[in-house]
């Protein structure tokens, strides 16, 4: 029996369902490993020693590749001093200064551990600042896994979601309707950098939509909260809506901010500084210094190497290659969202059977893809790695086409 | 100007209020540092190079002393392989096996990053398992800093707390009343290992109280949730209520579990495994392997060195010394809670002026104490360190007595 299967059996004995949350392999095709041994650059190795050219990047955190030497050296230097102390280190101040210098809308920053900590803190700041309660958010959008926002309501109460009002991403009429429904109780609008809903074609925000969100908040003195947890630092280092010329009031960050070290952040405009300062949010490890040192080094590399543009170029290379390959075998695929975060769905594939088979074939050829969720590129994905992946996907497309004929 | 003051000024420019949460130095007497440079064993050094014999242990996480070689070696070995990967490592299974072997009530375990993640997950499991909503918790008890449980409700809505019913710790009548108020909607009772409320004398649970909580849950098929985030692993490695012979259904853990590495856990009984497996909770870093490797090594040392008993002995030594010193200068102090987590309050000190002055005097003599919050011992606090601290507190008591005369 494989090491992976042995571990799954042991896990089921001592962990409910064998694992919790988004990394549970039940959501992936059969044959995908559950347990991993190591990572290096853009390659991961499972517990059975099989290595993959990886397009999930740990579901987002790895943006420079595993074991980036500059990040790990910075973390190591800080670790030699201390991590969890009785208060923060100088690195906290340096990181807040760095983020406010980098992110267009950011006048201040706070830190925590989970993306959900950051989105929740943003919602609380919006309510504290406005004295109002209603939060608008897009249907099917993922903003975390606490009772107020988990995509699966089991374990939560109706009251946990009492003041949420849904709208449809990129749909101005539904946004307007939700704003009207909130009336004079509108605290804020929480919106993802782009529509990256699970199992669906991704959508970039239209300029009209982003501006309408901004205008709705301005008109009613409500708070525009950008959830940049997933997209953050891959589309732009200035905030993902900066390219649209639309600035949020608050942004939630996590995942890629420290290249795999556990960290999250909230950035905000001066106008909301006072409310943020009065809010009581905290955690035992929120001042820990090592992840902040790692974040500082990560931001240095991101800026110096112009990583968003680089990921965009490599993502385009991958996207064009996949499109060419699919056409050649007569299979219809849809690639959506930003090239830095590839999403590949097959036409006429309501149960994802084609997508899953394609991924299984790619996995057998050493490339780790996801059939339903957006994927992620890192700085370690160079032209050679993209071309290597395309060699595998060529075989996967051919195998899938043969199977379907 | 001191480095600390310079950093405070820089921090106020880019961080709301200069810092968030429990580590904000506003809650400490003037003269306490906000920013720290390093830690080693039971000593911490602030950014101005002043070193202290530390009795806060980073507010709990440091239980073996900073830079414990065995823990850091295990973390280093895992780090060389990988931390945040596309799934967990074998270390996840080993840690769950270790905890279920160690903690009396534990049939399974799950992991997260914050103590609040763990308490919130417990509440959600209780609601999922029972299909009911009401959670009982003790007045003034701290169970985390999300909108449903933060001690300061700013930023939360009434609905966030709609299904909480308060009772008084160790008060059977108020517990009974709360149970009756919940009626057939009682999902669970959430209770701290002992009463460790801020600024108050601490109280160990009476046997009658613990048994009454257990019986109330048994009678109504409700879930007994022990919040062992703060006390966990300092009182007992089997769970803090094990000594009472009262087992919870679910326990929340964090702080000391990995000697400063960011980790939290939920352990539970088989009866709640199914509900836990159906709940959707997750976070970007919840499967990260380094903190789990650190936790495994931490548990090894905790068990081998019988750390709770050792902390108890050293805490008793400290407590007896302080009592003797206070008596000698004619000052009334009250020491409460478990010796492993010292709390020292002064008689006739409604505004904590005496306690704060005492702590300032101790700080000037190189010992870092807290005037209002429970403190923490670690394995690095040996007889020599306790006696060194007592030399400083002797001077602090004398200075305080002189000032008061």
Image: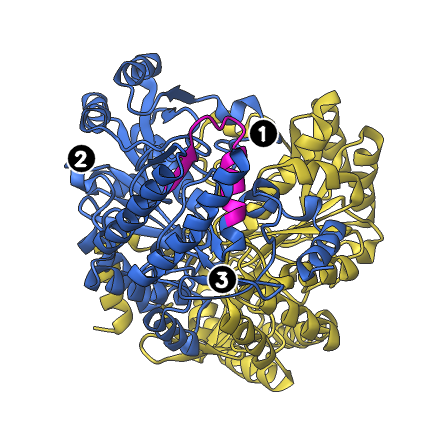
Chain colours: A blue, B yellow
Magenta residues? A343-361
Tell me whether circle 1 and circle 3 mark residues in contact (CB < 8 Å): no
Tag 3 or tag 1, which sits nearer the N-term? 3
Residue A350 point in image, percent of width and height: 50, 26
Label at residue B261 = none
Which residue is at the front of the view, A240 or A100? A240
- Residue in view at x 68 percent, y 40 percent: B276
Image height check: is B157 above or below A43?
above
Label at residue A44 = 3
- Residue in view at x 53 percent, y 79 percent: B41
Disc 3 chain ID:
A
Q: Horizontally, is B283 left or right of B34 in the view?
A: right
Q: Quadrant of the N terminus of chain A?
A: bottom right
Disc 2 chain ID:
A
Which residue is at the front of the view, A238 or A106? A238
Q: Could one spot residue B168 in this view of the protein?
A: no
Label 2 belongs to which residue? Answer: A246
Residue B371 point in image, percent of width and height: 50, 62
């Amino acid at each position: 029996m494989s090491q992976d299967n042995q571990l799954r059996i042991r896990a089921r004995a001592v962990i409910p369902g064998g694992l919790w949350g988004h990394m549970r392999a039940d959501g992936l095709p059969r044959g995908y490993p559950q347990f991993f041994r190591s990572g290096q650059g853009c390659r991961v190795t499972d517990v059975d020693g099989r290595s993959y050219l990886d397009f999930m990047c740990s579901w987002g955190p790895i943006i420079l590749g595993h074991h980036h030497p500059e990040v790990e050296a910075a973390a190591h230097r800080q670790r030699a001093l201390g991590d969890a102390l009785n208060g923060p280190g100088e690195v906290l101040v340096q990181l807040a200064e760095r983020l406010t210098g980098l992110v267009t809308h950011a006048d201040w920053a706070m830190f925590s551990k989970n993306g959900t900590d950051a989105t929740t803190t943003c919602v609380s700041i919006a309510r504290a600042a406005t004295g109002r309660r209603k939060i608008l958010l897009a249907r099917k959008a993922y903003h975390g896994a606490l009772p107020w926002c988990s995509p699966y309501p089991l374990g939560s109460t109706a009251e946990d979601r009492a003041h949420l009002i849904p709208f449809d991403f990129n749909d101005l009429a539904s946004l307007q309707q939700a704003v009207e429904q909130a009336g004079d109780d509108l605290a804020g609008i929480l919106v993802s950098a782009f529509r990256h809903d699970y199992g669906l074609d991704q959508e970039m925000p239209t300029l009209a939509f982003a501006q309408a969100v901004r205008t709705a908040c301005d008109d009613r003195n409500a708070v525009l909260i950008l959830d940049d947890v997933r997209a953050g630092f891959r589309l732009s280092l200035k905030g993902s809506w900066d390219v649209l010329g639309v600035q949020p009031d608050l942004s939630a960050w996590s995942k890629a901010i420290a290249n795999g070290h556990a960290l999250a952040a909230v950035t905000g405009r001066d106008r909301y500084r006072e409310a943020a300062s009065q809010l009581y949010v905290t955690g035992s490890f929120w001042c820990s210094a090592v992840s902040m040192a790692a974040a500082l080094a990560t931001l240095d590399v991101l800026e110096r190497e112009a990583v968003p543009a680089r990921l965009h170029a490599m993502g385009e290379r991958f996207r064009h290659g996949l499109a060419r390959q699919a056409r050649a075998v007569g299979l219809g695929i849809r690639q959506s969202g930003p090239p830095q975060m590839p999403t590949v769905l097959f036409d006429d594939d309501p149960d994802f059977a084609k997508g899953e088979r394609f991924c299984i074939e790619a996995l057998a050829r050493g490339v780790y893809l996801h059939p339903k969720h957006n994927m992620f590129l890192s700085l370690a994905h160079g032209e050679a790695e993209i071309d290597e992946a395309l060699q595998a996907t060529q075989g996967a497309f051919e195998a899938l086409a043969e199977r379907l004929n």
